[in-house]
Each structure stands twice: as structure tokens, then as C-alpha cells.
Amino acid sequence: MILQLPFLVIIMLITLPIYPLAYSAHELIIAKPGCSSICGGVEIYYPFGMKDPKCYVDKWFEIECRETSEGQKPYLKSLNLEVRVLGMHEVYIMNPIFHWNCPSRRAKPEVINLRGSPFVYSQDANKFMAIGCNNLAFLQSNGSNVACCVSICDDSEEVNDNFNLVREGSCSGRYCCETSLPKYLLEYNATLQDFNTQNNNTVSEPCSYALIVHGQVTSDFNNMDHVPAILEWKILDNTLHNSTLQLLSESDYVTCNRSNFTSSQTTGWRCDCLEGFYGNPYLAGGCTALPGYNNSQTKKWAIVGVSSSVGSIIFLLGLWLLYKDVRKRVIEKGKQKFFKKNGGLLLQQRISSNEANLDKAILFSLDDLEKATDHFNMNRVVGKGGQGTVYKGMLVDGTIVAVKKFKVEGNVEEFINEFVILSQINNRNVVRLLGCCLETEIPLLVYEFIPNGNLFEYLHDQNKELLPMTWDMCLRIATEIAGAMFYLHSVASKPIYHRDIKSTNILLDEKYRAKIADFGTSRVISIEATHLTTVVQGTFGYLDPEYFHTSQFTEKSDVYSFGVVLAELLTGQKPISSVRSGEFKSLASYFVECVEEDNLLDIVDKRIVKEAEKREIIAVANLANRCLELNGKKRPTMKEITFELEEIHRLVRKCNAEKNEDEFELARVEDYHPWDGYSTSKSWDSKLFNL
């Protein structure tokens, strides 16, 4: 009996992180003494509070309890937003819906502006959603489009039937579309563009909606003005009194950290109860020990017991080793479970049968990648998007890598097959896949690390101190991208269509060489494949119009996307811009129009116009124009594009070499023959013109 009791305590400690206990609110200190802590059934946790200013930390955290026809409801007074739930570092609010073609609803609600506040829309918990027929939905912030999605309806479908798709959780482009939010969204506006209106069609589409929402909405939007959303919060600098912060920081049960909060570099504080404690860390004495946790009194008892005899020390040591062993077994069992679930055994079979090269495809352990990324520290994040988060890491041998967390959708065997094929790609202008880790619920991919960011940042981010783009660099990057795509389409063992070629997926290494990345939407094509897809995938501004209308993706769809990138390189303009009006918001349409009307040099980047010969610019522009043909059959192949760009680049380098040689010869003449009394400007200018 004596041996069993401590063992049960150990088992409780082992299972505690896996099966957390629930505690009722009356056991917690949630508000300051004398302050109201409930409004309409919602518990009001400090630093939030009501009525008396001493009950909340500052004006941003003031809660107003309002009387409504449905009873009392709490509101964030400063933002006039209804609160459904208050949590540690999160607030569940009711967010307004934007309506279009809804006679009984106001189209544009008052835009919420969180600038200067301690709140920000949660990127992980929320999403931007649009519901309606044949719409382009844009999420705008600070005057720019930051996200968009497309929703399509068949002419024969009923709107009421389509709405069932939203209630059933299907939002993939048919009547309903969704996309992730940008980081640090503080204020936004939403607009919808109707396809029928763009095509001069007067058919009136039914009521449409745009919204930022948490979770899936299951009610009729015609009867709603608000939907649930989540705001994250921190306490801004100088809000908590210094003595209060010192008191909280010195507590045995509380930890407070200061970090950047928004893109404006505003800093704030977050406090949490230490492991083994729960409650409100912003109040003195607000953190309470979990039942069974080794609090200070238990530690004192343990010290007295251990000091009583050497035998007790050996006994406790044995229990600790037993706990460590059991815990290790639980962790290893979980890793094995995820390894099998994610197709690890199938991948091992492929590797052993020489379908994948061990030198190129490595099965990393979770421990290795946790050490490499400092346990996936947020300070190691180098990129975050709809498909996952990328961390910078360093392996034990000193190799710098990029570790990507993403969610595999579909059959595990398809993922393994794609991994095996990508591991065999051998092209210097394709980001090399080093291996994967299957010991987590969400598989991890490991790539070579590319240090100089992506081409989009290089072309459009004027704040970064980067090597200036030259005409030779422009041609070299274009040629490298084209060569890599030619390899994927025609040289690889099986053709690979990338399906999302864009400047953000083109990375630049330490020598500013281009490397194609992000094969999350790529497909390996067999000879019998029809390339017909059920859901149109891609990025607005780069998407092939022919693929958009037919849902049939071909190699020429990648060619169209490359044409947009080539136009970006020539003009230095973004693929979608609100500065351009009407149909010319798309760079592709604007570029084709300028080429056809002989206004090309008006939109080409001034640095390129100054440096390059006019015939060289026209040659590359004509190639981009052919890539942007609306009829895919008229577009060139990537092989033809690669050869043409290589020839143009070769002639440019030859011309530059001849110029340098002539300048060298001229310098030699200057050294030995004075120029006094002679004029050579006419003959020298003529020679330059003929190059």
C-alpha cells in the first residue's frame, strides 16, 4: 500500500497535461475587490472591468453593461463592439457584416479601426469569407488590397440551395470562398466586384456578403448584422503601473513578457500563470495551484521526508526515474502513432526500394528539428502563409535549413508519392527538399534555406537596402526561372505543373540567383491525365483566365503565370494594384494594352529604360506578351521561352563586353595621345549607337 500511493501521484502528474481538469469560476479571483465581474452571463476578467475606473486597467479595457431587448449584454465601450467571451489574451466579439444588393440592409457598416489600441484581429483564429454568386471579394487595409477570393455559381443553381454549402462547412469557391487574414490587421474595408457587371451584363445577382469571422456560420445572413470574431490583446507599455508589473514579475507563480505587438512596432505585456497554476495572472494572488501540484508546502514536506533517511532518497529517486521512463514511453508511442498515420512506413519502403535517394530525402526526427528551431520559437519565423509557417533552423552539423509546418489534405499515399518525386528533382534553380519529419500530427518539410527573401520583396519593398536591379540581373533571373520551369515540364522523370508561379514563390539566394519554391499545390502529370480540377487554385493576378473558365490546367497555364512575372520584372509594378483603374487593376491586362498601343516604354522601369537598348526591351516585352495570350494554344512552351531568353541574355552580355573592350582601348589611347585640338565625340557616339 505504501508503494502504491506515490506511484498513483506520478501517474496523475503524467496524465495531467493530456487530460486538463475544469474548474468553476467561483474558485478563481477574476476581478478586483468591490468590482462587478458578471454582465449577462459573461465573466469580466481584470484587466477588463466595469463602472469604476479602478476596476479596469485603462479606457481600452472598459466594459459597458447595456440593457437590450434580449437582456444585458457587455460591450467594449471604446470600440462599441459586443463581447461574447473574455479570455486570457483573446476577446470573442460580434463583428459587422458587409452587405451588397440587400435592400433591407446597410451595405457598408462603420469600419472598425483598432489603431492605437491594444487589440488586433487574430490571424490564426479568423478568416476572411465572402458569400454570393460570381463575385471577386477584396479585403482592403490602409488603402491596399491585402487578401481576396473568388466565388462562383452555376446559372441553374438556386441561391437557397447554395447557402446549404456554407452551413455544411464547404467553402471552396462555389457560392462561398475564404482566405486567411494578413498579420497584424488593425483596420479593414471589404468590397465585392460582380462578374456580370464587369462583362456589361445587367443580370442582377442575389444578395452577397463579406465578413471576417471565427469558425463556420450556420445562420441565414439575411437575418444577421454581426458574426463572431476574435481579437488578440496585450497590455501596452506604461498602462500597468511599474510597481504593479514589478509585483507580478516577482511573484512565484506569474511570468510577464514584453514583445512587439503590431507592425508599427508597438510593444506590450503579457502575463501568464506558471505551469501547475491557473487563474488571473494580472491580479495579486490570482494564480492558484492545481490540485495535486507540488506547491511550496509539498516541497517542504518532501525535503523533511528526504532528510529523514538515505533510504527515502533512493526511494524518491526510483520514483522519478520511473516517471521519466513512463513519460518517455508515452511520447515515443505518440511519435510512432503519427509516423504511421502520416505514411512513414510507406515512405521507408519507397526509400529502401531506391525510389528516393537517401542523400536527398532524409527522415528527420522531431527532436532534431526542435533543437534546430529552438522548439519552433516565434523569433525563428521567416514566413507565414495560407499553406503553413516556415521557421529558420540550424542542424547539428551547422547546415542552415527552412522547416515548414503545413497541413496535408487528401490521401497520405499521394503526399508520400509527391515527396518522393520532389526529393529527386535536381535543378539548381529549384529549392531543394532535404527531407521531412512524420513524428508530429502535422508533417514537417525541411528545405535548404534561401537567405535573400523572395522576388516580390526585392521588386516592390523600397524600405529594404538591397542590391539594385540591373538589366543584366533582370534577364538572368528571368532566364533562371524559365529554365527551372522547362526542367519541371519536360526534363523531370514525370512532368510537374507548379500551378502557383508568382514572384513571392521565387526566392533569391546569397548570389541573387532565382530558385522556385512552394510546391504545395503542384501536381505530377501522367500521360493519361486530363488535368481537370474540381476547384480552381492559384493566386489572383497570376491566374490563367483560360484555366479559370475551363477548370482545365495545362503547362500553358504555368506559362501565363510566368508571363505576369516577366511583366513584373520589366515594369517593377505589382500584379494587382488599386492605383490602376477599372480592368487595368491587373498588370497582365495593362501590360498587353500598352504593348498593343505602342506605349511600352511608358510603363517599363526607368532604371531598365536608362540601362538597356530599346530593341532588347522590345524583344523581352514581346515574349511576355505572347505568354499572356488568352488562347493557351498560342502561348510558347517553356522550352521556347528558355531558348529565347538565353539568346537575348547572350547578346546583351556580348554587347556589354564589346563596350567594355572599346572603353579600355579608348583609355589606352588617352594615356599615350593628348586630346588637345581634336574632336572625337561624333565618331564615338556613332559607334555606341551601332552596338
Image (spheres, rainbow, N blue to C red):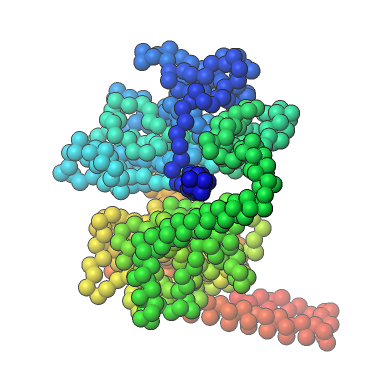
Can residue 209 be seen from the camera position used here? Answer: yes
Give the image quarter of residue 94: top left
Q: On the rendered image, what quadrant is the C terminus found in?
A: bottom right
| 326 lies left or right of 540 | right
Q: Residue 247, percent across and down?
A: 71, 31
Residue at figure coordinates x 43%, y 52% from the top left:
386
Q: Residue 250, percent across and down?
A: 71, 35
Above or below, comparing residue 433 to residue 535 in the picture: below
Above or below, comparing residue 93 to residue 389 in the picture: above
Instruction: Count numbered badges in the picture.
Output: 0
Give the image quarter of residue 264: top right
User: In the displayed image of the protein, which residue is found farthest to the left?
Assistant: 156
Above or below, comparing residue 477 to residue 215 in the picture: below
Q: Nearer the viewer, residue 157 or 609?
A: 157
Residue at figure coordinates x 56%, y 71% from the top left:
513
Residue at figure coordinates x 81%, y 80% from the top left:
675
Q: Residue 257, percent across and down?
A: 65, 41
| 592 lies left or right of 234 | left
Q: Residue 464, percent across and down?
A: 64, 55
Q: Nearer the viewer, residue 246 or 527?
A: 246
